[in-house]
Amino acid sequence: MTEFTSPAHFLEVDDFDAVTLKAVLSAAQEWKTNPLAVPRCLEGKGAALLFEKPSTRTRVSTEMAIVTLGGHPVSLRGEEVGLGVRESARDIAKMLSGYCSLIGARVKDHRELEAMASVASVPVINLLSDRSHPCQAVADLLTLREHFGELDGRRIAFIGDGNNVVASLAYAAALSGLEIVVSSPSGYELDSDVVARAHNLGGTIELISDPYEAVAGADAIYTDVWTSMGQEDQSDIRRAAFAGYQINEALMATAGPKAVFLHCLPAHRGEEVAAEVIDGAQSLVWQQAENRMHATRAVIVQLLGESSEGI
């Protein structure tokens, strides 16, 4: 078995190098089909999960990943902890490190994760921040790998807001050999620093404003909601700005019949995606959602340095 060096924490996808990320995906895929092979590396141990923002998929998938590793998830709501108000992120991380073998946090400000990681004596995992969503990106790669096999040379088009989801996806694509094109209306483009970072990782990334041009030749089309949590006061403005960026049957037809549809969920049918697409034969969204658990489990095992045949 090849040995890999784990980073101390997983705050962004490129905390793993390309070789390690591929090993994580292989392990996730193997353990999904062979649950008896899952290592019980958290047997008798706790994992603290802090949710400063509401969560459905992230909370359930992470809790179940921990349970299947033999551990006990301890989930905490933001108001119970008072992150940065009642107690600093650094103090919280030091305290939780004394009880648990892992800290996962879904935060409003990515800097809080960085503060936790700077003092925690156990791995810290980003369960979503304003800057990135790395576990989602690993699940996205797993879904595409299951469907297409090898990822190298495949092309994915992300249509919508240049947000935290597509930022992590861009780094994941770069590390796995996927080409990525991002199509957004003016003022909502992917940040230039993200594009530069993806390029520095060896990635092929394009920004194309016309969504029909962007999806031409794509193997997968991905979108997210136009208005994320905390942006509700911008919903009317965003609906107007993103008009014409809906993933509908016409857009899918431009990509071709073999293209698949992805969405990180929750979805707003009739806004960013037509019901006929998300509920249609080309949609992989439920497989993608299930893969959140399998992907996060493999990330945890990698961080804990657990030996297995799959990683």
Image (spheres, grey):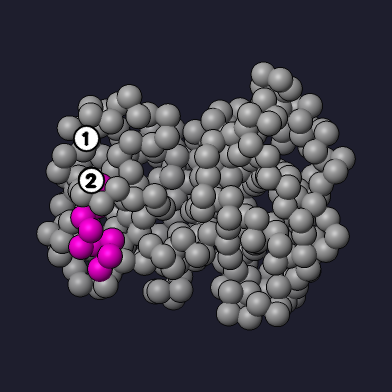
Residue 12 percent location from the top left of the image: 57, 44
Q: Within 10 angstroms of label 1, few (less than 14), some, or many (20 or more) residues?
A: some
Seen as rendered, the residue at the extreme front is 80
User: What is the distance, in whole Å, between disc 2 and disc 1 at their CAs?
Assistant: 8 Å
On residue 271, which mark appears?
Answer: 2
Q: In the image, is 290 to the left or to the right of 1?
A: left
Question: Is 39 within the magenta?
Answer: no
Q: Which residues are magenta?
A: 272-280
Q: In the image, is 271 to the left or to the right of 134?
A: left
Foreground pick, 310 / 240? 240
On residue 239, which mark appears?
Answer: 1
Q: Secondary structure at mark 1?
A: helix
Residue shown at 34% from the left, 47% from the top: 224
Residue shown at 17% from the left, 32% from the top: 240
Foreground pick, 107 / 75? 75
Which image quarter: residue 90? top right
- State if disc 1 and disc 2 touch (CB < 8 Å): yes
Seen as rendered, the residue at the extreme top is 85
In the rendered view, tell whether residue 139 sits above or below residue 147.
above
Q: Secondary structure at mark 2?
A: loop
Of mark 2 and mark 1, the one earlier in the sequence is: 1
Foreground pick, 85 / 37? 85
Residue type highlighted by circle 2: Glu
In the rendered view, tell whether residue 66 sits above or below residue 149.
above
